[in-house]
Image: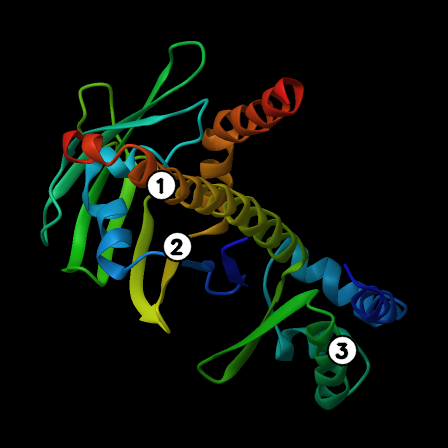
Amino acid sequence: MSEPEADAVFHALADTTRRDIVRRAIRREQSISSLAERYTMSFAAVQKHVAVLERSTLVVKERRGKEQIVRANLDTLRRATRLLDEFEAIWRDRVVRIDALLAEEASGATTAPSTESER
Amino acid sequence: MPVISTDKDTDALTLTFVAEFDADVERIWQLWSDPRQLERWWGPPTWPATFTQHDVVVGGESRYFMSGPEGEKSRGWWRMTAVEAPTYLAFDDGFAHDDDTPNDAMPVIHGSVRIEDVDGRTRMTTVNRFESVDQMDQLIQMGMAEGMGLAMGQIDDILAA
């Protein structure tokens, strides 16, 4: 996680309401209207808190019919990134092997062209 | 390094990998279409792949196994979903039982490769799409041996140098 990303996460979690929203969203997905009913603030204020959390990628928001649904995203994002890194490493190694194969063939073709047809 | 770029889309669970080689399009296509060529690079040296079937036509299937250092075998299958020789191939890649029948309980990766000429070199763009993060996790768990083998192979190379 980069410094600006870390800043966004810590800023997002520096507020009591936002921490509460994250805790609830981790347990199960929440609609913004159901969250608004729990707090003594306006729907718009809750929306602003969710927008901060969304920017920090701690939650994702999606529209489902008339409802806006908030889901915790921390674990998913972290895992997805790590896993894609691993597959990237597999492909890097494959490309290195292809390159070696092509290089070997190029040098083989100049030193022993007669064996080429037997491969 | 022939790797040009990689792109990881965590929302779409897609890995796009671009490399360029000093070879023509037909030659790079052979790396995918000729099973003897494919098995020289698909698996790492410690887990080499052997393709026992490889039908590169739409709907055609492949069977392969990867042999581990302890003699263990990990079996897999491909099913071609698009073939436009020599420039495009799309396939599903999954695990197989010991009798080579597809194991439907295991994850399937949706893979594709595009091969194109770019100023006399050949660009190879591979795309891997996964169905879920859990599936990716399962694949990495399964492939852990492969990854380990890789690291060990590299250590061997260093020791031999």
Counting other residues with Cα less than 10 Å from the Cα at mark 1, is it few (<14), some (14-19), or many (20 or more)? Answer: some
Q: Chain of mark 2?
A: B
Query: As displayed, is residue A8 above or below residue B94?
Result: below
Q: Given this view, does label 3 or label 1 mark the residue nearer the observer?
A: 1
Residue B84 image point, x, y percent: 15, 63
Q: Farthest residue in the front direction?
A: A111
Q: Residue at x 51, y 65 (%)?
A: B11
Query: As displayed, is residue A97 above or below residue B146?
Result: below
Q: Chain of mark 1?
A: B
Question: Which kind of residue does numbered mark 2 sit on?
Answer: Asn
Counting other residues with Cα less than 10 Å from the Cα at mark 3, is it few (<14), some (14-19), or many (20 or more)? Answer: some
Whether residue B16 sits left or right of residue A45 in the image: it is: left
The residue where tag 1 is placed is: B107
Judged from the image, the secondary structure of the residue bearing numbered disc 3 is helix
Residue B18 image point, x, y percent: 45, 61
Image quadrant where one finds the C terminus of chain B: top right
Q: Residue at x 39, y 32 (%)?
A: B43
Q: CA distance from mark 3 to mark 2?
A: 32 Å
Judged from the image, the secondary structure of the residue bearing numbered disc 2 is strand
The residue where tag 3 is placed is: A52
On residue B128, the disc is 2
The answer to whether marks 2 and 1 mark residues whose Cβ atoms lie closer than 8 Å is no
